[in-house]
């Protein structure tokens, strides 16, 4: 256990405030990623041809399953986005690539759990594969919107972390 671990006997408060600033940055990044990328997920679910004939609440249910993974991804990448411009570019690219993967796998895991607990237990693998396939195809369809959301995310995270000018 190092001095940064609060359970360590050698733990001391952070006099610089960097720890608290990093926590705030991660929270802002998580909230923005959940909001922006969750909206992109809903749009992807609405325009998917696979959604034809399904109730309009299905994309919202899919987004509800994907938002926790998107928020975690945003929280993890937010501290990198406030670094140099190269760091921000790398964080944006990582978010753009990781968001569809995180959303598809988070939704697939939720579907796997639901089907495993239902009477369709034997169809869990089929449902898992179908959700991933549909998620990846939908991500390709909304790639320009995803790129725009990522740019907005990077700019917003960088602007919110600036100290106020007096």
Image: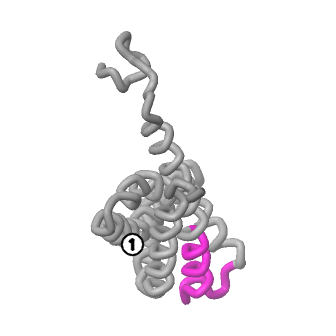
Q: Residues within 10 Å of mark 1 (few under 14, many from 20)?
A: some
Q: How many marks?
A: 1
Q: Secondary structure at mark 1?
A: helix
- Residue at 45% x, 87% y: name it: 144
Nearest the eye: 27 or 14:
14
- Residue at 64% x, 65% y: name it: 61
Label the magenta part by its dominant secondary structure.
helix
Q: Is residue 77 visible?
A: yes
In which quadrant of the rendered view does residue 49 lie? Answer: bottom right
Which stretch is magenta? Answer: 38-54
Report if residue 137 lies within the magenta region: no
Query: In the drawing, does residue 90 fall left or right of residue 114?
Result: left
Whether 145 is drawn above or below 57: the answer is below
Give the image location of residue 28, x and y in percent. 55, 54
Nearest the eye: 80 or 17:
17
Quadrant in which the C terminus appears: bottom right
Query: In the drawing, does residue 101 fall left or right of residue 1?
Result: right
- Residue at 38% x, 69% y: name it: 92
Give the image location of residue 24, x and y in percent. 53, 46
Q: Which residue is mark 1?
A: 96
Q: Is residue 120 visible?
A: no
Report if residue 45 lies within the magenta region: yes
Nearest the eye: 146 or 49:
146
Quadrant in which the N terminus appears: top left
Give the image location of residue 73, x and y in percent. 43, 57
Whether 32 is drawn above or below 55: the answer is above
In which quadrant of the rendered view does residue 83 lie? Answer: bottom left
Give the image location of residue 165, x and y in percent. 56, 59
């Amino acid at each position: 256990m190092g001095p940064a671990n609060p359970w360590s006997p050698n733990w001391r408060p952070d006099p610089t405030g960097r720890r608290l600033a990093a926590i705030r940055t991660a929270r802002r990044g998580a909230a923005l990623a959940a909001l922006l990328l969750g909206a992109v997920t809903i749009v992807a679910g609405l325009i998917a041809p696979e959604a034809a004939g399904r109730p309009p609440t299905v994309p919202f249910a899919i987004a509800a399953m994907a938002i926790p993974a998107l928020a975690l991804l945003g929280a993890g990448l937010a501290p990198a986005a406030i670094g140099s411009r190269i760091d921000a570019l790398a964080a944006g690219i990582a978010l753009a690539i990781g968001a569809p993967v995180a959303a598809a796998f988070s939704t697939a895991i939720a579907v796997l759990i639901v089907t495993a607990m239902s009477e369709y237990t034997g169809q869990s693998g089929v449902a898992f594969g179908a959700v991933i396939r549909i998620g990846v195809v939908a991500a390709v369809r909304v790639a320009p919107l995803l790129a725009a959301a990522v740019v907005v995310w990077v700019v917003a995270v960088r602007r919110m972390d600036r100290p106020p000018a007096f």
